[in-house]
Image (tube, rainbow, N blue to C red):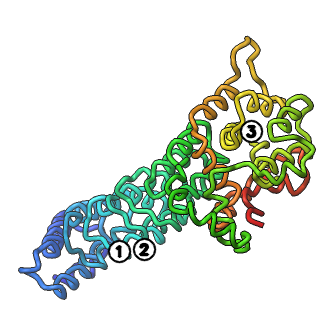
Amino acid sequence: MSDAVAATGEEGGGTAERFKARHALLKRLADVVSLPASRINAFERSVTGDLLVEMLRLAAPEDRRRVAARLAPLAELPNSVARMLLRDEPEIAGLLIEQCASLTDADLVSCARDAGPEHRFAMAGRRGLSEVVTETLFSFGETAVIEGVLRNTTARLSQVGLEGVVGVSRQTPSLCTPLLKRPELRPSGAYVMFWWCGPEDRRTILQRFAVSREVMQEVSEDVFAMAAREGWADPVSRKALQFIERRQRNRAAIAKSPFDDLEAAVAHAGQNGLTRETASEIAYLAGIKPLTGAKILGDPGGEPLAILCKATGLGRADLLNLWRSMRRPEATADGQVHPDWERVQVTYEMLAVDRAQTVLRYWNWSLSSALTPTLLRAIRQGEDEAVDEYSAPQRAAMMALAQDFGR
């Protein structure tokens, strides 16, 4: 019988009975592979699986689909069968990808690397994806796949994988919303994303990640006196205490400034326009680096202005002066409040001083140590709009937030 089948081959057509035999044998072999461990040992299952694979190579897609549907619920599946079916057409492989609980991380990672985008998209919705698998899926940079993983609430994300997605979101803003919903996202990533997020996502960042420093202030209250007695000689503790302390403004900068205080500098800018020198003075008096100030003042959305004003104790009139200093619109043509200006005012009102300071200080200091190279590259890329009002280093700062923080 085997000689007759071999002699006929695939090209010779064959009788209906032969195809019936093939269908029956495929089903029987799939049934054998499906037997519990009490009926078949691992070696027998493996050999049966090898034979099944050889038949499936020449089987029609519908036959392969039937076998995949039969094997998907199994708790144990021969590796050779899994490898073949996972690389089959997406509608066949999808039966295993979506339903087969016995697939290992190694099976899924290998499928993601060897198969195509449709396989990876199906895998993105699989329940219980591990960090290893999601990192692999992210590595292809496919927007639909990344978004599918982000929306999969049962998937687990590593910080390395998440940081990579933060970088991708710079060029693909549609990823920002699902990314901000992930419990694994940390403030360091959210504050970086702020610069390219839309208004609603920015609001989400401020509501979720603008945290208080009250606990840190309570536990380190006596450390300030210790550091003062040491003359603030230790740069490590000094920088950390600068982040924790309640005072935001730089009192020492007032003695060197041509302005009496921060309010005077802002009022001057509102009346005369924002020059490079005035922008630098505002930054110094506010207790931030000029590079940080350039990033804030150059932001097209305007929300960072509200954060700067609230963090430094500036009032609503000062916020208006800063807005006017950049020649930003206050009203529409029909006399209504301009949406941008309204949004900036809402941002100012919604933030508490302490939380606004946390955001501002993350931008100015902590991000320099919290950012990974992946996130730093994400900030540097794609910020092509230059503002002529600023010097070359300040324009560079607008492309790379926190590039020179902590110097």
The residue singled out by tag 2 in the image is: 110
Residue 207 percent coordinates (x, y): 52, 41
Residues under numbered marks 3 and 1 in contact, where contact means CB atoms less than 8 Å apart: no
Evaluate if marks 1 and 2 touch, with contact meaning CB atoms under 8 Å apart: yes
Residue 6 is left or right of residue 113, and the answer is: left
The answer to whether 275 is drawn above or below residue 99 in the figure is: above
Secondary structure under tag 1 reads helix
Which one is in front, 132 or 23?
A: 132
Disc on the earlier residue, 1 or 2: 1
Residue that mark 1 sits on: 83
Of the two numbered discs 3 and 2 on the same chain, state the one appearing first in sequence: 2
Say what amino acid the circle numbered 3 marks: Pro
Label 2: few (<14), some (14–19) or many (≥20) C-alpha neighbours in 10 Å: some
What is the quadrant of the N terminus in the image?
bottom left
Is 278 or 152 nearer to us in this picture? 278
Looking at marks 3 and 1 on the same chain, the residue that comes earlier in the sequence is marked by 1
Distance from the alpha carbon under mark 3 to that under mark 2: 44 Å
Q: Which residue is mark 3?
A: 300
Quarter of the C terminus within the rendering: bottom right
Position of residue 35 relative to residue 190, above or below, is below
